[in-house]
Image (cartoon, grey):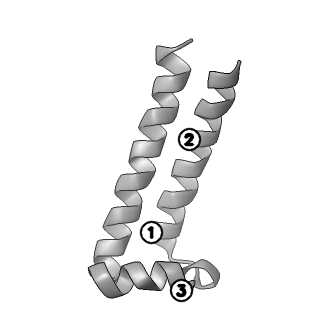
Amino acid sequence: MVFTILGVLAILWGVATIFVGSARPQGLWNNSKIQGFVSLLSATGTTIFFVIIGLAAIALGLWLLIGLA
């Protein structure tokens, strides 16, 4: 039961991370922490980083749902 909840939360977090990385909503994108990533990686690099992290979270969620069910 706990792994199911964690799996669903990981999938939701991954989808939200991919959304923030690809849609770049101004309220979140202008956050100082995200702008720190932008200054290090550029805007395109930050988008790619967010998409990779989001996909990893989705993969973890699926693994928790399927692998440990």
Q: Residue at x 46, y 25 (%)?
A: 63
Quadrant position of the N terminus in the picture:
top right
Q: In what element is the residue under mark 2?
A: helix
Q: Is residue 43 left or right of residue 16?
A: left
Task: Indicate which disc, 1 or 3, sits on the residue closer to the N terminus.
Answer: 1
Q: CA distance from mark 2 to mark 1?
A: 16 Å
Q: Amino acid at mark 2?
A: Ile
SS at mark 1? Answer: helix
Mark 3: amino acid: Ser
Label for residue 32? 3
> In the displayed structure, would residue 47 be above or below residue 43?
above
Find residue 22 and name its label: 1
Where is residue 8 shown, x and y percent of the image?
Answer: 63, 34
Q: Secondary structure at mark 3?
A: helix
Residue ranking furthest to the top:
69
Q: Position of residue 9 (x, y in %)?
A: 64, 40
Disc 3/disc 2 C-alpha distance (Å) = 25 Å
Horizontal arrangement in the rendering, residue 1 relative to residue 21 (left or right): right
Q: Residues within 10 Å of mark 3 (few under 14, many from 20)?
A: few
- The image shows residue 20 at horizontal and vertical percentages of 53, 68
The residue located at (47%, 40%) in the rendering is 58
Question: Are the residues at dot 2 and dot 1 in contact (C-beta closer than 8 Å)?
Answer: no
